Image (cartoon, grey):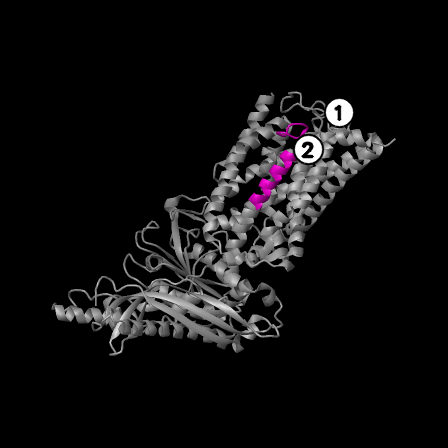
Amino acid sequence: MKKLLSVLLILSFLPSFSGCGSIYTNYREIEQLLVIQTMGLDYIPGGVRISLASAAGSGPESEPVCLSSAGVSITAAMERAQNYSNEDDLFFAHINTVILGEEAARQGIDSYLSFICRSPHIRIDMPLFIVKDTTAEELMSSAGRNQNRISEIMNTLYDNLERQGENCIFGANEVIRNFERYGSSLICAIEYADAAEIPSASENSGTAENGAKNQQAGNQRAGSSSGGESGQKSGGKTAAINGYGVLKAGRLLSYIDAEDAVGVGFLLNRVGVDEIIVEDQAGSKVTLEISQGGSQIRPLWAEDGSLHGLDVSAEVSASVADMEKSGNLDSPEYSDYITSRLEAAVSSRISAVLRLSQKLSADFLGLAGRIETQAPEKFRAMAESFEQCLPDLELRISVSGELSHSNDIKD
Amino acid sequence: MALCTVILMAPALRLFPSGYTALAGRAAWLSAPAAIPLMLLYIWLISRLMDKMKENEGLAELTLRILGKKAGKAVLLLISAWLLLFGGFVLRSGADRLITTIFPDSDPAVFTAVMGFIGLVAALGPARSLVRIAKLVRPVVLSVLSLVLVFAFFSIDFTNLLPVVAQDAGPVFQASMTVTEIIAVMLFLSCFLGGLTDKAPGCFRAYCVWMLLMVLLLTLLDMAIVGTFGAELTSRLTRPFFSLVRNLVFFKSLERMEALVVALWIFPDFLLVSLVLFSAQHTLRLLMGESPAFRGEPLLNISRKRWLVPVCAAVSVTCGILIAPNHISLDFWSEKLIPLINLLFVFSLVCLLLLVDRLKKRP
């Protein structure tokens, strides 16, 4: 009797372990899932528009799928996307990129960050991007072509950044922490740009000379955000890293362009491989590839204990990657001149970023944290907050550079 | 100590470190070391108490012997009530962990009832099996924890942990009470097993070594979590450890392992609930004049007042369902009420027993 009771008791529990109904209501076969990799968020009056993109081969169809849906909240929009799409079950657990439309970032991203923190689907260190001058929906629906759409483009972008060493992609957790600690943060900006691609054979005249010209034109378009029709004809649109968005109190205030973004790398001590073009004495262009660098920031304290300035000393090491005309790098004069131009270029970029921080009164570089690390007692005894002091701080910037090598060519 | 180590994992990841990072900020990782002086005092007190235990005697028997029949029974009733309430809370918080991490929108009553039932089955058996299960589970839990810590250390930003200044001492000591509570309660519960712990009762040195290892583990855990998220975000997260696990990517190919880790943490919950139910029924049966020692009874045998075991489980499950109807009230129970009750209870009872024993021995 007791054995029978025990068996019945165990049997009564078995249905709940079967994966059907009960607490396992989210059980689905993997073939039925459309794995979403990229999520876009755009502001619409009174709500949010989400864009969801899968990668090629991550769903029942081999083509990447892009969906869009609106709702009063992200959850409502996701629910709507799930219910009203022609696709299979949407699977959100492998989202690896969140792209914010520019207007969404300008209106404020607090609610989006809150969603990322709360959602059991999304990782809290989700990399965030702001797309310049357009919406995430526009970028996600039209960037790339055929099998390579936004998810593939973003994956390639991550691979490229990783190859270049230190990168400055900010995850949601970092952005939330920066907002809480410093009141502002940076988010990596991407531009919706024309893809760099050689036109197809039918468009090409066939001569080597014309091919080279077309390639040059294509490369120029890649750096421009307004490629126009010619860009559409050649390689379509793509997404490319282009500086940073500066956010304060959760709202986008300004951008740091790609050139000055080098300065951010130095100030955050996350310097990756980057190019700087300088001119030698003869006015010829020399392309230098920055390989290493970093900065030290020392607070300058007044006698009354207030902070009156910052002393930024940076170091940079670069190699010669390209020279318009051959220069004599063996000559100390020439080498010193190039080094001085490198130092000046880095200094101006650091200065530009710091001036912007002062102008916006936004400590998006976490300078307060670095000062606190160096002089915690003095920092905590400051009468004014660092953010209040920031616009009036005196800046002293010094850069020490070196040319590490000239890449196998003895000039 | 195996049982203590495993059951400590349940409250450790519930309270660590969001519960007190709001207090101590980036210095929160020093809270566990800051608890050492008070823990040493507690271990000294509980070791002295355990020295007074006779063979196969647990804390319940000792309480009855020291305080006498009337006062002893009153205190045993109080202990039982506390244990049942604590058991209910453990069931409810375990259910909440599953809901917030894996099964959103689920009813906590389902998880509470199922875990209560599994705990009941374990509490009907001998206490020795709990220790045996703990010995089996401990290496698995510690291995997973170590793996998570190793991978998490790559994402630590040390500016989230430093600088620490003298002004942080006050908040750190305040926050250390959480650590004290966690370790003290686990040691206290182990005393109900009556001679089943590894070297205890009465082994001050063994308890100290265990406590120091746990402090080290909690410190590393804290450094990994606060170092990754920063104190500001950590204090806002309900379960930062599981958020950390959700973020981990192993060798760029394996990710989203949090469901497995959360599922693994069912074992600490199960052992803690079972131990609490076992102690509660043991205490109540002793209170009712029964010798509660296990004599090889079959599972469904309800003789010798063993019917109290399912009753205890039912009361705990009911407590678990009723105490915190929503997440906000659970936070209040988890971060304020239960730690306070636990601390007061375990310290005052040990001190009371030692004091009465001392007074009784005076001529």
Q: Pinpoint the chain carrying mark 2.
A: B
Label 1 – label 2 distance at C-alpha:
19 Å
Nearer to us: label 1 or label 2:
2
Q: Quadrant of the N terminus of chain B?
A: top right
Tell me if residue B101 comes above or below residue A47 in the rendering. Answer: above
Residue B160's tag is none
Tell me if residue A142 comes above or below residue B255 in the rendering. Answer: below
SS majority, magenta:
helix
Q: Earlier in the sequence, mark 1 or mark 2?
A: 2
Q: Quadrant of the C terminus of chain B?
A: top right
Is residue B202 a member of the stretch shown in magenta?
yes
Q: Pinpoint the chain carrying mark 1.
A: B
The one of B230 and B270 positioned closer to us in this rendering? B230
In the rendered view, does B85 fall on the left or right side of A27?
A: right
Marks 1/2 same chain: yes
Name which residue type carries label 1.
Glu
Say few, some or many: other residues with alpha carbon within 10 Å of mark 1 (under 14 / 14 to 19 / 20 or more). Answer: some
Determine the residue positioned at 62% across, 74% down. A304
In the rendered view, does B51 fall on the left or right side of A410?
A: right
Say what secondary structure mark 1 lies in: loop
Q: Which residues are magenta?
A: B190-218
Rendered location of residue A341, percent (x, y):
33, 74
Determine which residue is flagged by label 2. B191
The one of A102 and A175 positioned closer to us in this rendering? A175
Rendered location of residue A57, percent (x, y):
32, 51
Residue B290's tag is 1
Rendered location of residue A405, percent (x, y):
28, 63
Name which residue type carries label 2.
Cys
